[in-house]
Image (tube, rainbow, N blue to C red):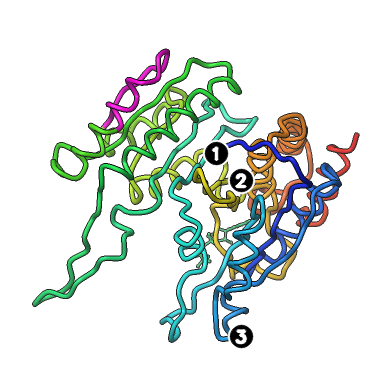
């Protein structure tokens, strides 16, 4: 299976709403998706803190099994108990690991009203780096190990090169990949990541390739995000830079993401968390999850539907009712209803 997939059967979509606003934005997104693509088969599974409190497990085996056998997954958000709980592990980290979802795609595009025009994609290595979970005690504290392997660097570079061409096709720009690293300090680990990415990129004729140190990349993202096409980087740098670009693009309420690999169903989720401060109030912005659905539709090889939903979201952002995080006073349900009407007309 490639990052876009051709179905020979009715595609199945597993919904894992999770906790907090996940319980509001995932049903909203599923409602729009079902209206757009009535042939999709939906099912639902539990994960997260509510699930842990009911069943003593944040990611039951049944949820994992359903995830493995679906074609795509829409994940909302899960809450982590402050101070932890015995045996509680973050379900999204476990899911990414169990399904081998090593590539995290985080696109960002300017708001229609913005003066800075940009449309970029961060491809974040999602299986190792500083998030490999290797922390060891030392006499006066802890050491966190940062893992960079040649094989993981190579496969994320391949995804990024492929994505650079898809991105260029959609935006009309030339395929452009920027390798972001800190190889001047992390000479061995990021040296390896850098050289693997540059080596793989030479196999893609027509791809413009450059590189930036992560600090310089942060400066240029803030100053002139329009100069970027696709960025490939390691786990922590990708996490931080993609929150920066989410901020430039209008905030967490608008930032979508996909988690992919070549051999498992892909998982689509908003970048935001469970937002306990607004959960249950009908105020959550559903657009980040709906933009994740745009990515899901492209993945399921339904570009016309993806374009329709994308255009509907842009229309709402231009002139429609908005949730409070974007300065409006519409509810989650009202925004969802407007989008649904737009995609059906
Ligand atoms: P978690 O611990 O689950 O990550 P958090 O509150 O630390 O939760 P987020 O859930 O990402 O992190 O929320 C960060 C801020 O962004 C909060 O003020 C939240 O209300 C806001 N926010 C997040 N998602 C949305 C959304 N969909 N619509 C509106 N505001 C949101």
Q: Residues within 10 Å of mark 2 (few under 14, many from 20)?
A: many
Q: Dividing the picture into quarters, in which one does residue 278 lie?
A: bottom right
Q: Is residue 39 above or below residue 221?
A: below
Asked whether disc 3 touches disc 2, contact meaning CB atoms under 8 Å apart, the reply is no
- Left or right, residue 172 beside residue 148: right
Q: Secondary structure at mark 2?
A: helix
Disc sitting over residue 223 in the figure: none
**Is there any visible trace of residue 120 in the rendered image?**
yes
As measured in the structure, the alpha-carbon distance from the residue carrying label 3 to the one carrying label 1 is: 38 Å
Q: Residues within 10 Å of mark 3 (few under 14, many from 20)?
A: few
Q: Which residue is mark 2?
A: 254
Q: Is residue 326 above or below residue 89?
A: above
- Left or right, residue 8 beside residue 95: right
Asked whether disc 1 touches disc 2, contact meaning CB atoms under 8 Å apart, the reply is yes
Q: What residue is at 13 percent from the left and 41 percent from the top?
A: 187
Q: Which residue is mark 3?
A: 55
- Say which of marks 3 and 2 sits in front: 3
Q: What residue is at 82 percent from the left and 49 percent from the top?
A: 34
Q: Tag 2 or tag 1, which sits nearer the N-term? A: 1
Q: Dividing the picture into quarters, in which one does residue 113 lie?
A: top right
The picture places residue 86, in percent across and down from the top left corner, at 43, 86
- Left or right, residue 208 beside residue 79: left
Q: Tag 2 or tag 3, which sits nearer the N-term? A: 3
**Which region shows up in magenta?**
197-212
Quadrant of the image for the N terminus? top right
In depth, the one of 12 and 220 nearer the eye is 12
Q: Which residue is mark 1?
A: 249
- Say which of marks 3 and 1 sits in front: 3
Q: Is ligand 1 within 8 Å of the beta carbon of the residue shown at mark 2? A: no
């Amino acid at each position: 299976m490639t990052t876009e997939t051709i179905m020979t059967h009715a595609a199945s979509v597993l919904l894992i709403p999770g906790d907090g606003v996940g319980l509001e934005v995932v049903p909203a997104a599923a409602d729009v998706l079902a209206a757009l693509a009535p042939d999709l088969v939906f099912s639902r599974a539990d994960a997260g803190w509510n699930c842990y409190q009911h069943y003593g497990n944040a990611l039951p085996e049944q949820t994992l099994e359903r995830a493995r056998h679906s074609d795509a997954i829409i994940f909302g958000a899960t809450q982590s108990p402050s101070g932890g709980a015995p045996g509680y592990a973050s379900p999204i980290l476990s899911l990414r690991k169990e399904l081998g979802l090593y590539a995290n795609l985080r696109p960002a595009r300017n708001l229609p009203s913005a003066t800075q025009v940009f449309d970029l994609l961060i491809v974040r290595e999602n299986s190792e780096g500083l998030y490999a979970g290797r922390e060891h005690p030392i006499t006066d504290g802890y050491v966190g190990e940062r893992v960079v392997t040649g094989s993981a660097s190579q496969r994320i570079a391949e995804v990024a090169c492929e994505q650079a061409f898809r991105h260029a096709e959609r935006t009309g720009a030339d395929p452009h990949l920027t390798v972001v690293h800190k190889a001047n300090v992390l000479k061995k680990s990021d040296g390896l990541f850098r050289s693997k990415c540059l080596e793989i990129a030479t196999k893609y004729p027509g791809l413009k390739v450059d590189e930036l140190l992560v600090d310089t990349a942060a400066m240029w993202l803030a100053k002139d995000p329009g100069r970027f096409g696709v960025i490939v980087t390691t786990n922590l740098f990708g996490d931080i830079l993609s929150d920066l670009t989410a901020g430039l693009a209008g905030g967490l309420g608008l930032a979508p993401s996909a988690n992919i690999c070549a051999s498992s169903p892909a998982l689509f989720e908003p970048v935001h968390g469970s937002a306990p401060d607004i959960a249950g109030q009908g105020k959550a912005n559903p657009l980040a999850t709906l933009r994740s659905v745009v990515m899901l539709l492209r993945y399921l090889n339904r570009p016309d539907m993806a374009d329709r939903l994308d255009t509907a979201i842009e229309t709402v952002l231009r002139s429609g009712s908005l949730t409070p995080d974007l300065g409006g006073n519409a509810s989650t349900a009202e925004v969802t209803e407007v989008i649904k009407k737009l995609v059906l007309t």
